[in-house]
Image: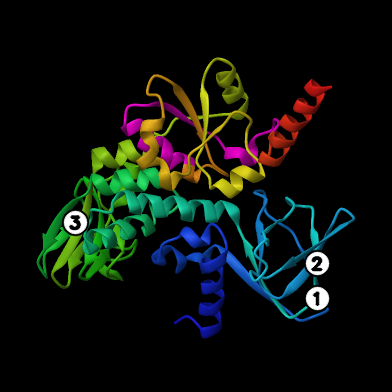
Amino acid sequence: MMSVKLERVLDNLSSNYMPFTLLSRERLSEVVNVVRFLELRAGEILQLRGGKANDYLYVVEGRLEVVQCGSVRSFTGPEDTQSKPFVLPNSPATATIIARQDSIICHADRELLDNLIAWDEVVHLSEDLDGDLHQRLELVRNSLVFRRLPLEVVETAFKNMTIQNVKAGEDIIRMGDEGNAYYIISSGTAETYQIGLYDDEPTKIADLGEGDAFGCEALISGNRRNETVCATSDCTLLVLDREVFDDIIRTPLIKTVHPNVARTMVETGYRLLDVRYAEEFDDHHIPGAILMPLYELRNRMDELDPKERYIVYCHAGGRAAVATLILAQNQFDVVSLEGGIRDWPFDTASVESEVGGRDELKVANAN
């Protein structure tokens, strides 16, 4: 159960700071898994080091100063409407935090946050699903095999799964059989039995329940089943056929390109499509990119020319992968930028610098 203080802090984030303001309630409940909250008393000093993705630092409550590379910047809580998150330096560089009031700060891993935003859009794409199907989609995402795979793989797996109902007492898979499917328990319970090296009879090794998965070992190894799984109550199972499993695990669904290749592609006519939020785009983007945030993509797709070729990017790749999948499904010639703008080694621009550059050009022409 979430504490009252944590609920207050999350409400503060979701009410005042992008991208938390656009996350669904389900995804907000997962925020605690991708951020950490730190409490500082007035006068306390802390050194923070970001990851490889220029992590964000939000001032949820209070006021503090951030010292980095000899410069000092002051940040306050969201009562200051001009307040923005501080971008932490990449590891191993550090920033020194000085609390000027009792403060609560939020350190957000931007890559994990990026994936959370992307997953929200995957779920949103399936908005026509009823509650049970949404729950099953989450079960697939959280199963061991798919937990670390790209989100577009999870969506594809879910769309290819079938439902199987099993009565209590029935064997779902049997030891020695050929592996022909991967299973996730949507509802019900089961038991797993194996024969150990020195056993004569099968021994129960695990109890299984909702969300538990089994059957992948034989699919990956190519060997026969080494376990028997028996339903101990009526079960509903999500089943992924071996052929589809092999295609999903072994064949990448999204074409990605290295930044060096992407730059050459841009020079030969590819268009850059930035699917981050406007605030991120304003801060820095790849020159010439079109801004079309992921959550707007479906409604604005007719603004894109199907005759053009596109390179999609976000911060680290999660949102871009989902956008690339959506566009590919709609017959666009599209690839995703590997590592996103985080790993882009070439020049970037900000809206402020572009406006300033245009103003300077006007002045020069006037003279």
At which x and y percent is residue 341? Answer: 61, 39
Quadrant of the drawing holding the N terminus:
bottom left
Residues under numbered marks 1 and 3 in contact, where contact means CB atoms less than 8 Å apart: no
In this orientation, does residue 175 appear? no
Q: Is 218 left or right of 235, judged from the image as shown?
A: right
Distance, label 1 to label 3, CA atoms, is 62 Å
- Which residue bears the numbered disc 3? 173
Q: Name the amino acid type tagged 2.
A: Glu
Marks 2 and 3: CB-CB under 8 Å?
Answer: no
Mark 2 in CB contact with mark 1 (< 8 angstroms): yes
67 or 296, which is in the foreground?
296
Determine which quarter of the picture holds residue 99: bottom right
Decide: few, some or many residues near mark 2? Use Cα within 10 Å; few <14, some 14-19, many ≥20: some
- In the image, which disc is placed on residue 65? 2
Badge 1 is on which residue? Answer: 100
Q: Position of residue 105 (x, y in %)?
A: 67, 70
The residue at the point 66 percent across, 45 percent down is: 283
Which numbered disc, 2 or 1, marks the residue that appears first in the sequence? 2
Q: Residue at x 80, y 76 (%)?
A: 100
Q: Give the quarter of the figure containing the C terminus.
A: top right
Give the crowd class for mark 3: few <14, some 14-19, many >=20 residues within 10 Å.
many
Q: Is residue 80 magenta?
A: no
Checking the image for residue 267, the label placed there is none
Q: Position of residue 126 (x, y in %)?
A: 28, 51
Residues in magenta? 320-347
Kindly identify the amino acid type of the residue bearing the numbered disc 3: Ile
Residue 300 in the image, given as x and y percentages of width and height: 39, 38
Mark 2 and mark 3 lie on one chain; the one further toward the N terminus is 2
